Amino acid sequence: MAVGVLALQGSFKEHIVCLRKLGVDAVEVRKLEQLVGLSGLIIPGGESTTMAKLAEKNNLFPALREFSTAGKPIWGTCAGLIFLADRASGVKEGGQKLLGGLDCTVHRNFFGSQLNSFEMELSVPTLASREGGAETCRAVFIRAPAIVDVGSSVEVLAEYPLAPGQAPQQEVGKDKVIVAVKQNNMLATAFHPELTSDLRWHKLFLNMINDGGEGAQVPGAERIVAKKTNVPPALDQIRDMPVFREASFLSLELQ
């Protein structure tokens, strides 16, 4: 069994490094036939409009929708969150094609331009209760979206408290926004866990695969999740060191 990472554009290599740290067979996905046999799929951060155009050019939308409706877990980070949303605001002129399936409204570039990117310690008690560790995680927001509305079946996993004046004009009056959610077989984060050494979000996603998204076992999925004792302690404990600083590990993994 293997987990795919949509590799059209964006931070797909960083996700692959995280999956390999957890003993998972990670596959770069660029063609529809590469989705066959995968147990789950990550849609990485990047530029959502470009990603959508490349997916359409490669005729991936029908296969991605079939993958989702089959109940296989999908995780979208940053641009991947926009990709999964049913509704999006703040998009470029002419609109943007979405995969959909996640009952939420996402505001593209909620926090502003690239210059407004930031890092913070984000409160994640639900993640801590399920995967252990601290009740905060290092969250990297890069020209990030935010979820401004969710349906009743969406579980909120993390919220970001807004500073005065931080919300864009269309969202004035909000004191917080949602930045991580789960609904059925879908997981979404507005930030980039793949750019830190905190592997708990990846573990959470792998456990969704192991549970078949909604509790139905995916045949053979138990073989792709590394047992906690097999994860080097140093990788489990360091929570805020970006992956790109681990040059020696990257050079070994990506040869």
Image (cartoon, grey):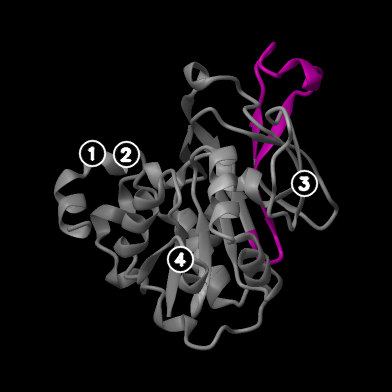
The x, y position of residue 228, in whole percent, is 36, 69
Hey, what amino acid is under mark 1? Arg
Left or right side of 104 for 58: left
Contact between marks 2 and 4 (CB within 8 A): the answer is: no
- Which numbered disc flags the more N-terminal residue, 2 or 4? 4
Type of amino acid at the residue the image marks with label 3 = Cys
Do the numbered discs 1 and 4 sit on residues whose CB atoms are within 8 Å?
A: no
Query: Which numbered disc, 3 or 4, marks the residue that appears first in the sequence?
Result: 4
> Are there few (<14), some (14-19), or many (20+) residues within 10 Å of tag 4?
many
What residue type is disc 4 on? Gly
Category of crowding for the residue at label 2, using alpha-carbon neighbours closer than 10 angstroms: few (below 14), some (14–19), many (at least 20): some
Q: How many marks?
A: 4
53 up-or-down from 41: above or below:
above
Please name the residue that numbered disc 3 is placed on. 104
The label on residue 245 is 1
Q: Secondary structure at mark 3?
A: strand
Task: State the extent of the magenta-drawn residues as a range.
Answer: 159-186
**Circles 1 and 2: CB atoms closer than 8 Å:** yes
Q: Residue at x 24, y 53 (%)?
A: 234
SS class, disc 2: loop
Q: Alpha carbon of mark 1 to alpha carbon of mark 2: how far?
A: 6 Å
Disc marking residue 242: 2
Nearest-to-viewer mark from 1 and 4: 4
> Mark 4 — residue?
4
Quadrant containing the C terminus in the rendered view? bottom left
Where residue 230 sits in the image (x, y, percent)? 28, 71
Callout in the foreground (2, 4): 4
Kindly tell me whether residue 75 is visible in this rendering: yes
Quarter of the image for the N terminus: give it.
Answer: bottom left
168 w.r.t. 206: above or below: above
Mark 2 vs mark 4, CA separation in Å: 22 Å
